[in-house]
Image (cartoon, rainbow, N blue to C red):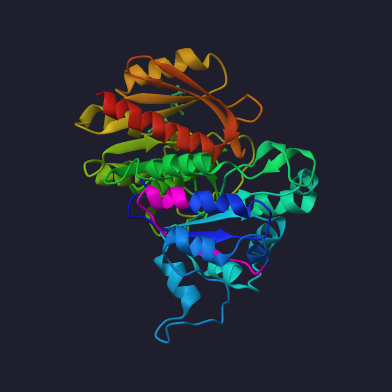
Amino acid sequence: MLNQKNILLGVSGGIAAYKACALTSKLTQAGANVRIMMTENATEFVAPLTFQSLSRNPVYIDTFDEKDPKKIAHIDVADWADIVIIAPATANMIGKLANGIADDMLSTTLLATMATVYIAPAMNVHMYAHPAVVRNMKQLDAWGYHFIEPGAGYLACGYVGKGRLEEPESIIKVIDNHQSEDKLLSGKKVLISAGPTQEKIDPIRYFTNRSSGKMGFALAEAAAQFGADVTLVAGPTAIETTNPLIDRVDVTAAEDMYVAMHDHFQANDIVIKAAAVADYRPKITYDEKVKKQAGELQVEMERTKDILQSLGEIKKNQFLVGFAAETSNPLDYGLAKLEKKHLDAIIINNVSTEGAGFGEDTNIVTYVNQARKQKELPKATKREIAESILKLIDRDMKDD
Ligand code: CTP
């Protein structure tokens, strides 16, 4: 996956900078075009000439050392890179990036690049555990930076513990695997529904449910990251989509969702119904506010259409996936839905379990395919669960 890739290797000032030499050599051997950017402190550990010889490219150190008047070097290299690796990443470099500080060429370039960035930390065991470093890494993780965890072992400072820069071979393996995952759904069109629906009573009131939309949105984000062309049909939710690769269609009621899903269904390869669709809606709706009267009020409800089932009945080559939100006997109910709605897979969700309910940031699910092969996905963030679900779908589509 790294062949012909443009890789910027950022080297910050720690003793592990010597391992970045082997990393440069291995990346070059893997066919990558490698450019090196060092901090001033890194040059105290390894001479720039070493990196220049190994990468066969000039080494960047000083923002103001502009060699080509036609270009602004840090922007040019930020745009050129497909992948940026910071190895070793010191606590200082991690702190600068997490706080938007750009006071040298490497930190400035990191703010300017749109490339995928991998951070391989290396530092003393206590520094690695310091709340400031932990907080900064968490922030970067939330922004989509990828960490390559340091190994545990003998550290140059004399301590034994976590903080040793991962070996160059392992760094390359992690990046290589991640890059192939990034292409997992490339060329595929994915349609996802998310969130609740709202069923109108009058201009002021409606029936709805507790779905936050987080699971469906996480699936959309993960599918886009895996290279898919994503359409997200979203019921009313507070979540925003900023990813330009996701085409969002907002709907309100189950009937609007039915129309939107059918409009897009034929053009898609994978269809995932993560929405919590209302099964009933008021039979009569009012254009004026319903005024209170003496005694009780009865609202007669009628069934909405089962969108997923209707898609199951017309599906041709689509890989159709449903969710089953259950509070008891999840497996039995889930398998019945898989069968009845003609699905290729179902994601069974026991919403009464702690860490798996509506509105939570985590989930716990079981993925079951048509062959009844089950995969338990233990408690993880909804984004992690989404990535695992998409990998299982990809596996099952390849098996077909
Ligand atoms: N679903 C749908 N249209 C509906 C109801 C549900 O498309 N009117 C879809 C959901 O998006 C989900 C799956 O069907 O993917 C299962 O939804 P769930 O609420 O768990 O079950 P129901 O089919 O509504 O069955 P029950 O109410 O008996 O649990």
- Residue 289 in percent (x, y) is at 53, 53
Quarter location, residue 102: bottom right
At a point 40% along the width and 60% down the height, the residue shown is 244
At a point 34% along the width and 32% down the height, the residue shown is 394
Task: Compare residues 182 and 351 and report the one nearer the observer.
Answer: 182
Position of residue 159 in the picture relative to residue 26 (left or right): right
Point out the quarter of the image occupied by ligand 1.
top left
Query: Where is 297 relative to 253, above or below?
Result: above
- Residue 91 in percent (x, y) is at 71, 56
Is residue 118 among what the camera can see?
A: no
Q: Is residue 33 magenta?
A: yes
Which stretch did the figure color magenta?
25-40
Q: Quadrant of the N terminus?
A: top left
Query: Where is 294 relative to 49, above or below?
Result: above
For this orientation, the residue located farthest to the left is 316
Q: Quadrant of the C terminus?
A: top left
Is residue 179 among what the camera can see?
A: yes
Position of residue 224 in the picture relative to residue 214 (left or right): left
Q: Is residue 241 magenta?
A: no
- Residue 222 in percent (x, y) is at 44, 44
> How many circles with numbers are drawn on the protein?
0
Task: Compare residues 313 and 1 and report the one nearer the observer.
Answer: 1
Quarter location, residue 99: bottom right
Query: Where is 20 relative to 160, above or below?
Result: below
Task: Compare residues 189 and 341 and report the one nearer the observer.
Answer: 189
Position of residue 307 in the picture relative to residue 355 (left or right): left
Task: Compare residues 114 and 24 and report the one nearer the observer.
Answer: 24
At a point 48% along the width and 64% down the height, the residue shown is 52
